[in-house]
Image (cartoon, rainbow, N blue to C red):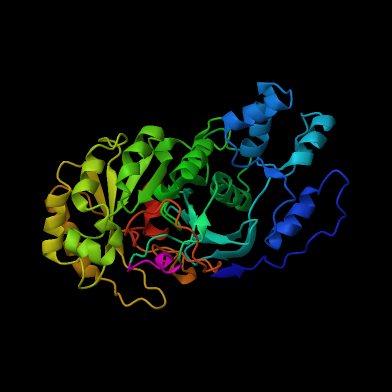
C-alpha cells in the first residue's frame, strides 16, 4: 500500500490582485478550509445556468460551449489557460469565477491497485472517493460520494457511524471524478471511447437520493457529450431504498439502479437498516418494478452483504427469490468487510457459495463480489472521512429513517465496470 499525504503541500504566498484573489490564492485558502472571497466555482454550474450567466455578461451561447469544453473536456484548472477566449474576457471571468478542485489530504493506493482519495472542500469538510480497476481489463469505476457523512446508520456500514454533516454540491460531486482524471492524466476526454476511468458509481459516502437534485445535476454534467461524456449505461446509482425518489431518478437520468437490500424480510431489515421502517420492502419492490431504467439488458442490482449468522441462511436465500418476483434483477453477494469497532463477521466462503447457488437455482444471477482495497479501508462499507463529527440539519431525511442501506465502494464498483 502507498499512502501519500498532501495536506501540507507548499502554498503560494503571491499577493492578491486589486480586482480579486488569484486562483493560487484560492487554492491556498481552500487548503485551510476557507471560501474564495465570493468568487463562484464554474465546476458544477449546469449548462442552462451557464448560458444565463453568459447572456447576462452580453456573451453568446458559443462562449458557453467554449467554457464547457475547457472545463469538462480538457480539464483545465485556470481560466487563464482558456487560450481561445480573449484576454479581456478571461480577466473579466476571473474576477467573479474560478475553476476549482477539492484539495487532496490523502492519496492511497492498495496492493490490488484500488485507489482512494480523501478530498477537502472549501469549508474544511472531507469526503472519500475510490477508483476500482477492473480485474480483467484496463478500465474501472470511480466510486463517488454524495454527502459528508451519512444521515443513516446501517449497523454493518462504517460510513453510517459518521453522522451527516452536509450534502455535497453538484460541483463537489462531479469534481471527485475530475480529480480522479487529474490523477490518471485522462484529459482531454478520450475521443475514441477507450478510457481507464470508464464508469461512475454513486456508492460512496452518503445516500444519493437524500441529495437528489445535486446528484442529478452532477450526473447530467458527467453525461454531457461535449464534456466528460460518460454514458448513462456506465453510471450506476445505489440507494438504501428512498422510495419516492427511485422512479423520479429513472425518469430524469435513466442510469443503472442498485438497491442495498441486505435482508429478505421487514423484521430483519428493520433491525440492520432502520430506513426500512419508513420504506418497507413491499413499497421498495413496487418502486423497483416501476423503475423506468429497468430492462432485460440492464437489470436492477440487488446488493446483499453476507453477515455470518444474521442474513446468510438457506431460508434467507429462498425468501429473497420470492421477494424480488417480478423485478428484473440480479444479486451481488458481498462478503462483509470488517472495520474497527464492528461486531459483525463475514459468512464463510463455502456458505456464501451455497447461498449463491440457491439464488441461481431460482433463476437469479448471484456473483460473489470479492473485496477490493481492504488494506486502505476502501472496500464496501468501509468509507469514513475524518471530517467534523457535528450533526447538521438532516437535509432530505424524514421521519424515523435512521439507517442507511449503503454499501460503500469496493466490490460494487466492479458491477458497473464489467
- The answer to whether residue 400 is above or below residue 208 is below
Percent x, y for residue 341? 39, 78
Q: Is 332 displayed left or right of 379 in the figure?
A: left
Q: Is residue 161 magenta?
A: yes
Q: Which residues are magenta?
A: 155-162
Q: Residue at x 22, y 60 (%)?
A: 263
Pinpoint residue 231: horizontal percent, then vertical percent: 45, 35
252 left or right, relative to 320 = right
Q: Residue at x 70, y 26 (%)?
A: 56
Q: Nearer the viewer, residue 107 or 51?
A: 51
Q: How many marks?
A: 0
* Residue that appears at 26% across and 60% down: 262
Quick check: 10 above or below 303? below
Which residue is painted at 85% across and 43% down in the image? 19
Residue 228 in the image: x percent, y percent? Answer: 56, 38
Give the overall secondary structure of the magenta segment: loop
Residue 91 covered by magenta stretch: no
Amino acid at each position: 500500500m502507498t499512502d501519500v499525504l498532501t495536506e501540507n503541500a507548499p502554498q503560494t504566498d503571491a499577493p492578491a490582485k486589486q480586482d480579486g484573489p488569484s486562483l493560487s490564492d484560492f487554492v491556498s485558502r481552500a487548503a485551510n478550509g476557507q471560501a474564495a472571497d465570493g468568487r463562484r466555482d464554474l465546476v458544477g454550474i449546469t449548462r442552462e445556468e451557464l448560458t444565463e450567466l453568459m447572456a447576462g455578461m452580453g456573451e453568446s451561447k458559443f462562449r458557453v460551449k467554449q467554457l464547457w469544453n475547457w472545463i469538462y473536456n480538457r480539464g483545465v484548472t485556470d481560466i487563464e489557460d482558456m487560450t481561445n477566449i480573449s484576454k479581456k474576457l478571461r480577466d473579466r471571468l476571473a474576477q467573479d469565477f474560478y475553476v476549482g478542485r477539492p484539495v487532496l489530504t490523502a492519496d492511497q493506493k492498495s496492493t490490488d491497485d484500488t485507489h482512494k482519495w480523501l478530498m477537502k472542500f472549501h469549508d474544511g469538510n472531507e469526503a472519500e472517493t475510490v477508483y476500482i480497476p477492473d480485474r480483467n481489463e484496463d478500465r474501472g469505476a470511480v466510486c463517488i460520494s454524495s454527502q459528508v457523512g451519512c444521515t443513516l446508520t446501517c449497523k454493518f456500514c462504517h460510513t453510517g457511524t459518521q453522522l451527516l454533516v452536509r450534502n455535497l454540491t453538484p460541483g463537489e460531486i462531479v469534481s471527485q471524478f475530475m480529480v480522479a482524471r487529474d490523477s490518471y492524466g485522462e484529459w482531454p476526454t478520450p475521443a475514441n471511447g477507450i478510457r481507464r476511468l470508464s464508469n461512475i458509481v454513486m456508492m460512496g459516502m452518503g445516500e444519493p437520493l437524500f441529495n437528489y437534485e445535486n446528484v442529478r445535476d452532477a450526473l447530467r454534467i458527467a453525461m454531457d457529450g461535449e464534456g466528460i461524456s460518460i454514458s448513462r449505461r456506465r453510471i450506476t446509482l445505489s440507494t438504501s431504498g428512498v422510495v419516492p425518489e427511485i422512479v423520479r431518478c429513472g425518469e430524469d437520468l435513466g442510469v443503472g439502479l442498485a438497491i442495498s437490500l441486505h435482508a429478505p424480510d421487514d423484521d430483519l431489515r428493520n433491525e440492520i437498516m432502520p430506513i426500512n421502517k419508513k420504506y418497507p420492502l413491499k413499497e421498495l419492490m413496487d418502486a423497483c418494478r416501476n423503475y423506468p431504467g429497468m430492462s432485460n439488458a440492464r437489470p436492477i442490482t440487488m446488493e446483499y452483504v453476507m453477515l455470518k449468522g444474521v442474513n446468510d441462511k438457506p431460508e434467507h436465500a429462498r425468501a429473497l427469490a420470492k421477494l424480488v418476483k417480478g423485478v428484473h434483477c440480479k444479486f451481488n453477494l458481498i462478503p462483509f468487510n470488517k472495520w474497527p469497532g464492528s461486531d459483525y463477521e463475514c459468512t464463510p466462503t463455502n456458505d456464501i457459495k451455497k447461498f449463491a447457488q440457491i439464488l441461481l437455482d431460482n433463476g437469479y444471477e448471484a456473483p460473489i463480489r470479492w473485496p477490493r482495497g481492504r488494506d486502505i479501508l476502501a472496500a464496501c462499507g468501509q468509507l469514513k472521512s475524518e471530517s467534523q463529527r457535528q450533526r447538521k440539519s438532516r437535509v432530505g431525511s424524514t421521519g424515523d429513517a435512521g439507517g442507511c442501506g449503503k454499501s460503500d465502494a469496493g466490490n460494487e464498483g466492479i458491477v458497473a465496470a464489467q
